[in-house]
Amino acid sequence: MLLKYAVKDFLDDREYKNVSPFTLSGYRRTLNEFHRFCVDQEIVGVTDVTPAIMKQYFIFCQKERGNNPVTLNHKLINLRAFFHYLQKEVELFTENNNPIRKISKFKTDVRIEVFTDEHIKLMLGYFRRLKYRDKSFYSYRDATIIVTLLGTGARLGELINIRWADVDFKNSTISLFGKKRMAIAIPTAAKLERELAEYKVYIQQRFSDLPEYVFVDSRGRKLTDNAIKNMFKRLKEVMNFRDVRLSSHTFRHTFAHRCLMNGMDVFTLQRLLRHSDMTMTQRYLALWGSALKEQNDKYNPLNSVNL
């Protein structure tokens, strides 16, 4: 079977099984890159892929693509899913000759970066000045994205999927769609609620009809994950932070860090972060640890920030 057809089969199967668009996009990026690498090595048949080729691919990702261990592990997860599918569903491999089986997870640093108060004040101050000086759509939207990430600990995929129908101002909750496509309602801090309410008024005035999604482009279309990443690239150039990575996931780490440092219990944090098990939450606890609505109101990181 040609590798390109195996990739298409797998992607069709994932789409049929209704994996999230964010997850499907990750599979597609990894497998398209892997396919191009194999073609460059004159490998076109999927059964011609060997453990040695797999190792060469990851060396290529490290040296040529500059991938860090976290990115390498994401690619490894995607490729494991692909080759597991070819083994179990298509029966092209057995447990013994599956080329991915001996590839171990890459070691990552234990340190998890978080934003300080100074980082947060600089970012919010920058967007606040843009909002009142330029009054541009991008200023309002990007400022609200920052506040939403800080106030909810949302993943990138969860953020771009928030609809206005998911924001319940009456009950002070936002429904986020997690990795398993399940909606989980989490409480919203009062400051975040005010920011979203103001932003909604602005959006209603800008567009003739309120867009379905909260965070959209200038034409009212849902933002992609790449659009958010590009926003952070632009912000990184302005902020020039040397000591922390400017990304959506750093906001998630910051949310967890502030909650734990202020005394939130690990079970409440697990629910707020939508972790399916305690593994990652306990990792946070090992690094920083010393009714849901009440605890969120008390410990939310937006409480100490002037918006």
Image (cartoon, helix red, strand yellow):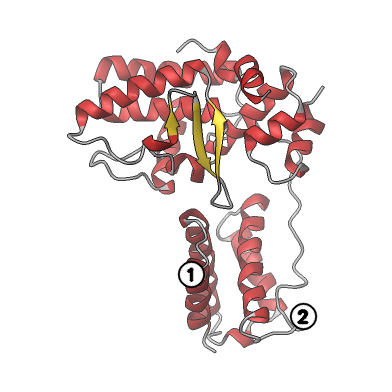
Q: Residue furthest left?
A: 208
Disc ID at residue 95: 2
Kind of residue at badge 1: Tyr
The residue located at (40%, 26%) in the rendering is 144
Secondary structure found at label 1? helix
Q: Looking at the image, is mark 1 or mark 2 earlier in the sequence?
A: 1
The residue located at (31%, 19%) in the rendering is 131
Disc ID at residue 82: none
Horizontal and vertical percent for residue 264? 73, 22
Q: Quadrant of the N terminus?
A: bottom right
Taking depth in this image into account, of 217 and 32 the one nearest to the observer is 217
129 to 200, vertically: above or below: above
230 to 65, vertically: above or below: above
The residue located at (65%, 50%) in the rendering is 70
Disc ID at residue 16: 1
Q: Quadrant of the C terminus?
A: top left
Mark 1 burial class by Cα count in 10 Å: few <14, some 14-19, many 20+: few
